[in-house]
Every structure is written in C-alpha cells, then in structure tokens.
Image (cartoon, helix red, strand yellow):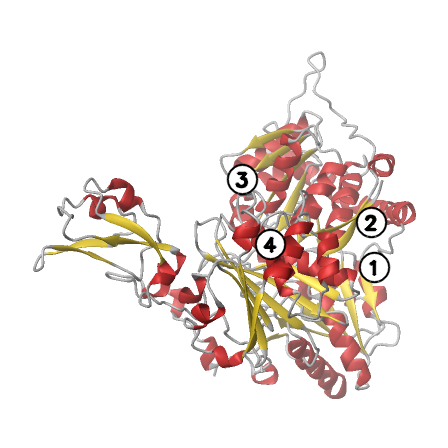
Amino acid sequence: MAKEVFYSGCAAAAYGAKDARVEVISSYPIRPYTGIMMELSKLVANGELDAEFVHGEGEHAQVSIAYGASAAGARAYTGSSGVGVAYAMECYSPAAGGRLPCQMAIADRALDPPGDFGSEHTDVMGARDQGWIMGWAESPQEVYDNTIMYYRIGEDHRVQLPQFCCQDGYFVSHIPGRMKLEDQKAVDEFLPPYNPPHPLDPNRPVNHGPQIFPDQGSAINVQRAVAFDEIESVIEEVVKDYNKQFGRKYSPFVDEYMMDDAEIAFFLQGAHARTARFAVNHLRKQGVKVGVARLRFMRPFPTKAIQESLSKVKAVGTVETSTSYGGQSRGGNIIHETRSALYPLDKRPIVTSFMAGLGGEIVTLNEFYAMAKVLSDAVKTGKANDSYWMNFEKEVLDTHK
Amino acid sequence: MSQEVYEVTIWARGVFQDMEGRHASLLMANAADLGGKFVQAWDDYADLPDRVGVPLRKYVRLSDEEIEMRFVYVNNNPNLVVIMDDTIVKGMNILRGMPKGGSLIVNTRRTPDEILAFIPNKELLANIVCVDASGIAADAAIDFMGSEGGVEVASVGAGISAPLVGAASKVCDMFDVKNVVKVAANKDGVQKGFDSAQVKAL
Amino acid sequence: MSRFIIPKHLEVPLGAVLPAPVKEQPGMITGNWRTERPVIDHEACTTCLNCFIYCPDACWHLDEKTEQMVWNADYCKGCLICINECPANCLEPVNELEFPDGVVRLEKPF
C-alpha cells in the first residue's frame, strides 16, 4: 500500500533504496548524508530489508565495495557528502568505465576550509565528468522517486552506468516534507531485478578492470560516450513510465515554472528552485515577466531540452550553488555549459550567472529580486557580466536587509 | 518577507531529550496540520544532539498560508518557547528575538515565579506556563538513531513531549488540545499536562 | 580595482585562520550543558587531586594559596565524574537552579 509520510530527504533516500530492493549497502559516516545510512541500518537490523550492510573504512572503500558488489551482480548502494565525496574520487571512473550501475546518494556539503557542513554543489560537481549519471532533487518526494528511477536508467543495458542521486544537504536532506511512499509491488513492477551482463559465476569467470595498453584507451572511453548518446531517450522513457505508474508530473530534464511568457528566467538545480518560484510569484505581481527553469539532470547535460526551454526568454541567470575558481565566467559551473548549449541557436538569450547559495547560505527572496533586476537591466542594455557574486558586488549588494 | 508565520523554538538537552524534543515539534506540527495549518517541523542543523546535556533547538513553523521561508535555518523571532529542562534558563538567552507578547512553557517542579527569577527579559512574555512533565510522563527511551535527518517510525509523543505540548495548547491558539490528543501516543499525558499546567499571565 | 566589495558583516580572516585559545576557549562555553553541579565540602576534602586528574575538561584545580580545590563554572559540563572518583566523598550533586550564580546565558549555542 502506498503511504503518506512526513520524511526528511535522508529518510526518503533510505526508503527509496529499500523499495528499490538494494542488495548491498556500504556506509561511512559524514554529515549530512549520514541519516540515510542510519535509516537503512535500522531497516536491515529490523529485517525489513534483506541486504548486506558493509561498513567501509572510508569513502574510497565505500565506493570500492559498491563497485565490487555491482560487478558481482548485486544492486549496490552507497553515498557520501562533501570531503567524503572528494576522497572517493579515484573510484568513480573505474565504476563508470567498468559499466557498473551502482548508485551513490549524495547530500551535498561545502568543501573545506573551514569545516562547513552547509549545502553547496561543489563536492560532487567535481566528479561530474567521470561518466556517472547525475542530477539534483528538489524535495524529499523527488529524492525517493529519483532513487528508484536512477536504478532503472542506470541498469538499462543501453546505458549501464553508475548514478549520483543528489540532494541539497540540510535544505532537502534534513527538513521533513510530506511525501508518498509507493506500494512495494508497484515499485517492483516498475523496477525489475538487476540483470547483470556478467553475473558472478565460477563456471564463467571474468576479469574486471584489466590493465591495457595506451593505444587501447580511447576505445574504452568511446564506450561511455556511446552510452551518453543513448541515455537521453532512456531517461525520457523511464520518466514517462514513472509518471504514468505513480501519477507524478516530472518533465525528464527541465522543470519549468511560468516559462511560457517569461522574458527573463532563473536557471538552477536543487532546492532553491522552491524559493525561486515564490520569488516569481511576487515579481509577477509587480509585472516582471520572470520564470524558473530547474535542471533535473546535470549528467547527461540535456542540451536539446535546455535549448527549447531557455530560447523562450531574453535573459537567463544561472544560479550556481557551486564554484569554478578561475573558470571562464570567474564564477560557477552551470553557465559554461548553458552558454555552450545555447550558442548554436540563431536567437539566443543573454546568459549571466549568480554566485549564490554557497557554503550553505540560503538564497533569499531578496537575492532573487536583485537577480531579476540585473536580468531586466540586461534585457534593456543588451549586456551583463559573466558572473555576479551575490552580496559582494555593487549590482547585488545588501540583499540581506 | 511579510508573511505571518507563527514560530516555535523548543529547547531540549542533548542525547537524553533529543528524541522527546523532536517529538514535541512533531506533535505540534501534526496537531496544527489536523487543524488545517501549513506546518514545518525540523531539528536545528548546527546543534550537537549526540553530546550529553548540550542545549538543542527543535523548531516548528505554523501558518495559514504556504510557508515561504522553508530553508531559513533558525526561528529568529519565536512566538512560543518551550523549555524541556528548566536549568536551560541559566545557560541560554531563551527569549532571544521573541516579539513582545510571547509565551514560555517550562518543564519544571518549580513555580512560575521561581523560573522568572532567572529570566532577565521577561517583559517580552504575555504568559508563562509551568508543568511537571517529567512527573507526569517519564522520559521515553533514548534513541541514538534518529538524530541525523532521520525519521520517527515508532510512536510520537510517548514521553515528556506529550504533557508539554498539552500544556502549550493552553496558551497557543495555533493547535488545539483535542488534536494534540489525537496525534500523541500518550493521550492521557497530553490531557494531564493540559489540566495541571500552572499559567501565570504577565 | 577589484570588482568585489566585502561588506563589514561578511568579513573573514584570510584563509579562515583564527587566533587559537591559550587557556580557555571563550567561543565554546560549555557550562550550560550542566543540570547538576558538584558542590565541595572543603572540610572533608583531602586535596588528593583525583577530581583534577579525572575531570575530562580540566575544571578542577588546586589553589596553592588557600590549599583548596577550585571549580570552573563556565566550562563544567556536569558529567559528575569527579563525584564518582572522589575517595573522600566530599562532593555532592545539586540542581543548578538552587544557585543564583553560574549563569552563562549565551545568545547562541554555537
């Protein structure tokens, strides 16, 4: 039976993993994702989930355990936050290159210094180019749904890739929200057991991750590129199925709010989209034609969907929530790929970026109002800077007041 | 932000009151939810709930419309403050940010006047409610598991949270004692808390 | 000229390097963790220094002038290990609200 509950994002991820019937779980504590493993360990201890629960001696070990379990044919689950995500960096490419569809739950956290446990997307964005599927959820409900959907996307034989199932630390992971846990039978129907291409079999031994010669490297790389060419249609299929089965309304790649007649738009991923929508409601009352486009997948970066969505407006502001020090925009990450995606269009909007939501700072309504002003001015003057650091540059000062 | 949001801050002590503190926030939220309010209930993110005795904050926000300030970490202007252990009045400025006319609920065997002696900014209060919640209901079992973004699968409001929230409903009109009784595990405790609370108007 | 303006309330030392505490850490007062405090009977105390040795937060020390043990109200967390370790039974736990002193009343816990 489906059940209405009041769960945090951490619990939502744990119950998503439970309903996905994960078989091997590897854990190591770090805030804020710890709650996921605490819930899962309870479920395993109480006999509600039949899974191996393995304590890693660090995040590097955690992902290695998930790698091994996935190679043996199990549905594997792990997770981390912040510096833990960074510590496991070595293991990401082997899992993706070995085409092992384990899942890693991320409740993101700022990297040091100093020891800051607030939300920032920088930790796992650092691993975005390793061949993992990656996207942010906005609410506990979406965390639960993504956990289940990602397994089906990743385990599809056209894809065979591991997944970072991300949520904002604290904002999603620690604030409970009303959500629905689906009926186990219905989830089983949607997500069949993992059918590994090389199940562990003493009669058919295989060798994972062998050493190769340098001239063979590109052929391995191109396999992942092939998968990312296929993946968008798989995601569309899976999201459509999920919506149909469970009555959700997810768009596969870009979640739009009041975009149809918008002149300017906020483009962002994660929890702050909620505040952005409230800001849009208030700004619309003052006659500002503004909309929100929320990115649901960072990898694959959905070029076509972004072109369709953002070409409707005259100016776009990406809200970065992660850093790319010394990058082209001297700000964050999303703007670079957004601009690249829009470049081939004949009629393309002005694209600028706002450095907000860093180190766990909330993005307030006032900050969104200041961004809207910069974007409206950009429509009038036809230009904008590459990046604006909220509260630290003259155009966007004093939004705390 | 001009939205009318009723804020509650609950002060509890680390480890032995962590779960009961969270249950108090959940009881208020669930009861107000039954009464048709928009609610939010959550634990403070910066506190250290796994250290014995450390002052902890649990929060509730209640409103007649959807709450816009969901991500703001703390309740800066609590209308209602609940103290699960009376000695916290010496350790924290518990009324910090309270708009004039607020309420204070204290779990204590002492009288309102004895508690007020430790509160320098009592002019902010419209009333103080003292209730011997620990006497009515023993502390529920200590749960080391639920602190980090976890959830309550067991019954909510079996220990001291029940009489405390029952007493709070005497001065707070955002949730009704009947609804608190409906959502709490220790229904008797809620009623006893409501009945035995000493209210002193200021 | 830098494009950045750092507002006063957002200033941070370069690299987040802070001065370290020498004796006590005023940024981490822990006296408010306490519900009961150890009260000493100086007549019965033999100044064996067990409390000094066992206190996890170094909240007991011997004042050499008066030859009496001195207790630190700002940092004692009320764990009462000293009472457990006192061989002279000269320490006793008393509820904190019995005393008007020892008020910390922090504005924020952290």
Q: Is residue A216 left or right of residue B74?
A: right
Q: Which residue carries the number 3 mark?
A: A28
Query: In the image, residue B123 lies at what x, y percent?
Result: 50, 81
Query: In the image, residue A292 lies at what x, y percent?
Result: 78, 70
**Which numbered tag is attached to residue B76?**
none
Q: Are marks 1 and 2 in contact (CB under 8 Å)?
A: yes
Q: Which residue carries the number 1 mark?
A: A304
The three-letter code of the residue at mark 4 reads Ser
Chain assignment, label 1: A
Front in this rendered view, residue C1 or A193 = A193
C-alpha separation, residue under disc 1 versus residue under disc 4: 53 Å
Residue at the spot 27% in from the left edge and 47% down from the top edge? C55
Front in this rendered view, residue C85 or A309 = C85
Residue at the spot 40% in from the left edge and 56% down from the top edge? C33
Residue, far left = C65
Chain assignment, label 2: A
The correct choice, above or below, for A108 with respect to A71 in the image is: below
**Which numbered tag is attached to residue A232?**
2
Q: Mark 2, residues whose alpha carbon is within 10 Å: few (<14), some, or many (≥20)?
A: many
**Which numbered tag is attached to residue B161?**
4
The three-letter code of the residue at mark 1 reads Lys
C-alpha separation, residue under disc 4 versus residue under disc 3: 32 Å
Q: Are marks 4 and 3 in contact (CB under 8 Å)?
A: no
Instruction: Give the secondary structure at mark 4.
Output: helix
The three-letter code of the residue at mark 3 reads Tyr
Q: Does label 3 or label 1 sit earlier along the sequence?
A: 3
Instruction: Give the secondary structure at mark 2.
Output: helix
Query: In the image, residue A119 lies at what x, y percent?
Result: 58, 59
Q: Mark 3, residues whose alpha carbon is within 10 Å: few (<14), some, or many (≥20)?
A: many
